Image (tube, rainbow, N blue to C red):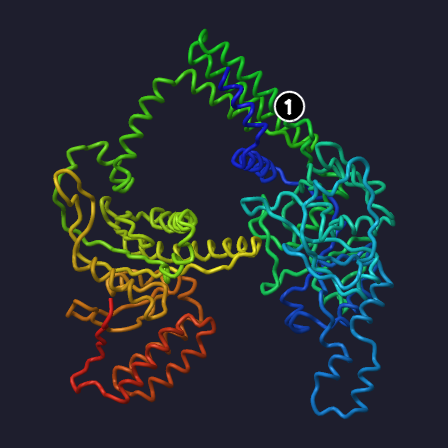
Amino acid sequence: MGLLLLLASLRVVDPPLLEELRVRTFDIFQVIQPREVSERPVVIVDIDEKSLKTLGQWPWPRTRVADLITRLTELGAAAIGFDIVFAEPDRLSPGLAADAFRNLDEETRQKLRALPSNDQVLADAIRQSRVVLGGSGMPVATPQTDAPPQIGLAALGANPAPFLLNFPGILRNVPVLEKAAAGRGLFTIRPERDGIVRRTPLAMVAQGTVIPSLSFEMLRVATGSSTVLIKTDAAGIQSVAIPGFVVPTDRNGQLWIHFARHDQAIYVSAVDVLDKQVAPEKINGKLVLVGTSAVGLLDAKTTPIDPLLPGVEIHAQMLESVLAQSVLSQPNYAIGAELLAAIVIGAVIIWLAPILSPTILLAFGAIIIALMVGTSWFLYTQQQLLIDFTYPLLSSLVIYLTLIFTNFMKEQAQRHQIRSAFGQYLSPALVEQLAQAPEKLVLGGEQREMTIMFSDVRGFTTISEMYKSDPQGLTSLMNRFLTPLTNAIIDRKGTIDKYMGDAIMAFWNAPLTDTTHEINACEAALDMQDRIAELNRIREQEALASGKAFFPLNVGVGLNTGLCVVGNMGSDLRFDYSVLGDSVNLASRLEGQSKTYGLPIIAGSKTALAAKDKFAILEIDFITVKGKKEPEVVYTIMGRHDVAESGTFQKMRDLSIKMMSRYRSRDWPGALTAIDQLRDADGEHKLAGLSELYIERIQAFQLSPPPDDWDGVYALQTK
């Protein structure tokens, strides 16, 4: 009973993990049965790649946007909403252009200045239509030169502002446009903690003003309503409404979107609208959203159904849900229903567990599970209500396991304690092997061909100095980047040998045999770069939101394949499963040189040649590392097979081979020419560090030529 009360309080507190489990369940419902579409009342006018290719880069002159509005109005658009903000005056306006152009006579300048500005032309077009301009909530307050136009909002009940999403600032359109618009709203969408968009706010507070969302403001303008009504009670927002549409929301004024599958048919190209290539029935009487799917401009979002969806379609899906009266809602009584179900079922289990056999109790549990899942599914499909079954199910399962498997759990806890003790210094795979065969816990080892990896965070000493007064923050940062890097290795069948501060040593093909260990190691190295890039993206967003400085983390990786000795090494009292050998030392040296070459991944010849058919691999040097006499051809891994097949990489590879050939034949001018060509082909500057390194070497050789017996080998002076 004490456990039952504890679990009941857990639902009241509703920790993030429980909330995520609940929303993930709702995601599954939508994946299984998304919203059915019978009509398409919304059209997206897409500033797509085709439009940019035909009409030029964005931003376009506002006169062209005015033409787009005029054409959509002629086609009968019910309302036009912009998922775009016109925050600054058009730099292509005649007056501004007159000041920007050189060598214009004064008469021409005066004529240009006398022409109306592009913003005024756009404002005139907006005034002749039903246009809603979009704005964006900002994390910091923004200066406002004038008061924004008043928005028709009314509250029924308590003041809604404390419950709504609040943004300290707002990115507005230029005043001349806002004064001409029929409405204005915010197109800001805030994803959930896991990055998935499930809810969109219908109203928000931005810089102290309650403002409706772009999509709901379009509904108001299209229906001719003068006011948006926000209904509240003590628990928060109940609904947001205009005449004819009462939309239930969560306590923060957010709508649970009932998603349909992505349909390209609702998109029309902006250039086709301007060229009069769109049939009137495609636009007539519909709500038109103007947004973009172009790669360079794309505001991509993730939904429960689509992993990548243009942000403008989120607004379209919201409008379709409301207009089709297919809106999902989680009623205020949901938490009470979930609590009641959990308490009743838990009490029944506590009553029946001591008197029923485990088999009958299991059958009873299966019936309860089917009943809870079925009820939740029925309410979703028939009533569009979101009632969670995972919490009552989880609560009942916890009580059931506690009553039936107490002794079993004690035994498992003891085994877990043993595994944890070994798992602190052995790989998980080895721990399981040792659990099955303890006789393997002996000193000694075996010789195997293995692939070794060393990785290190660049400039970590400097980063550490920034945390000298915050050791907990440094620890948190280390755990935050070591976790995804470790997972990248483990996911590719690697074994973590040890952590050395911010560095990781790992190996493949031991203790379990891996016939493709070179390929798996290369995959892990690329995965590590991808994961650290994603972590940097998240940290940059966090830094922006908190106003703190952002410093990116960059990881250098060295890979090498060769014969090693692997096994339990140490003393009779303490030993580790580790690896030794010349190949290990070379892998460490290669990682150290990744900074010298300006490349994230450097691999020895055996690793690279074994994986050459799977990856974009480029030879970068013929070297002897410090402490070794035998030279080694070293390579960099620039990507997977798709990169290797790209024309850009193939051109870079050919130019790199040409440069190496000229360099090793002492054709210094030819090598420098090849480097210039390589720089031109390297649009993303991935080989910039390598190019600079060879330029410095060649300049040094031009002043002091290498000996006559020089064979192209370069002896590195640092580790």
In this image, 363 relative to 598: left or right? Answer: right
| Residue in the picture at 22% in, 31% down | 436
- Left or right: residue 472 compared with residue 596: right
Image coordinates of residue 126 in percent, x first then y, are 83, 63
Image coordinates for residue 560, horizontal then vertical, percent: 25, 60
Displayed quadrant of residue 184: bottom right
Residue at (20% x, 60% y) in the render: 585
Q: Is residue 343 above or below residue 30?
A: above
**466 displayed left or right of 568:** right
Residue 662, given in percent of the width and then of the height, sits at 30, 84
Coordinates of residue 318 in the picture (x, y in percent): 71, 46
Name the kind of residue labelled 1 in the image: Ala
Residue under label 1, please give it: 337
Residue placed most toward the observer, 486 or 480: 480
In the displayed structure, would residue 43 be above or below residue 357?
below
Q: Of helix, strand and loop, which one carries label 1?
A: helix
